[in-house]
Amino acid sequence: MKLEIIATSVADAIAAEQSGAERLELCAALSEGGLTPSLGLIKAVVSSVDIPVHIIVRPHSRTFQYDEYDISVMLADIRHIKQAGAAGIVIGVLNEENKVNTEALSRLLEEAGDMNVTFHRAFDEIVDQLEALEVIASYPQIQRILTSGGQAPAPEAVEQLKQLVEKSQDTSVRILAGNGMTPESLSSLVSATGLEEVHFGSAVRFKRSFMYPIDPAVITDIKRNLKQLSE
């Protein structure tokens, strides 16, 4: 079982690693759903931890449909992220029909090269997620999809997440459950769906808010539960 934690600062990254996180998603502007962090922060976090750091590449929060100016910015960000030594990127691009924008995705992946890639929760804007999974899985560079199984929080989408996990078994893509994840719902969700990777954000912070620091004890408890689930 893999545990990914959202980090917004160097202190977050260090606390998450020391508490047992196996991967970080580094974001800025969590109040807007997460935007690309500054290059200075990326470099500082990458140099401060040993676990993989994945950087969200999202230039604005208005939509997951991007024009040519946006794509140019995203391509430049990916180049800088790669040069900073990050392990991976977190991306998602949709077309006007809210399906995977394969043309834009191909361009971003070409720039990413051999970096690790997660398709982020733009996936949850897509109506036919099983079809979208097939499209995303056709790109060998993409290792996982971050999803709550739709618009509802992950613990409320058990059946959809189970279907996605089952469909992903014959592909190189894994389902990473995020959004609304809590320590209390973790065991039942994993047991019911077969998830192998989970993603936590505000639930591992004091007062369960991004306004407060990471609570190491919560991550430690989650790791303990995940170990028990994998035994």
Image (cartoon, grey):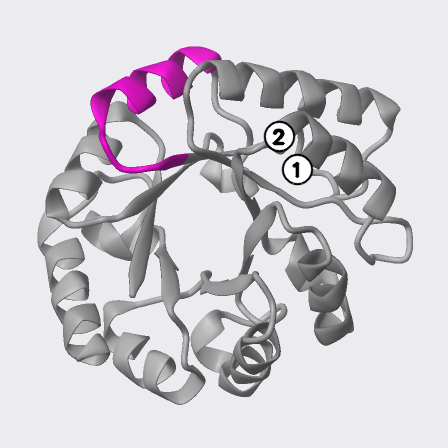
| Marks 2/1: CA–CA distance | 25 Å
Where the N terminus falls, by quadrant? Answer: bottom left
Amino acid at pointer 1:
Ser
Q: Position of residue 71 (x, y in %)?
A: 78, 26
Disc 2 packing (10 Å; few <14; some 14–19; many ≥20): few
Magenta stretch: dominant secondary structure: helix
Rendered position, 145 above or below 118? below
Q: Position of residue 99 (x, y in %)?
A: 82, 58
Amino acid at pointer 2:
Gly
Where the C terminus falls, by quadrant? Answer: bottom left
Which label was assigned to residue 151?
Answer: none
Question: Residue at label 1?
Answer: 61
Q: Residue at x 29, y 75 (%)?
A: 186
Which label was assigned to residue 113?
Answer: 2
Mark closer to the observer (2, 1):
2
Rendered position, 65 above or below 151? above
Q: Residue at x 86, y 49 (%)?
A: 95
121 left or right of 2 in image: right
Q: Which residues are magenta?
A: 39-53
Rendered position, 114 above or below 210? above
Residue extending furthest toward the right: 96
Q: Position of residue 227 (x, y in %)?
A: 16, 70
Could you tell me which secondary element the residue under label 1 belongs to?
loop
| Nearest the eye: 161 or 102 | 102
| Nearest the eye: 25 or 125 | 25
Q: Residue at x 32, y 45 (%)?
A: 23
68 left or right of 44 in image: right
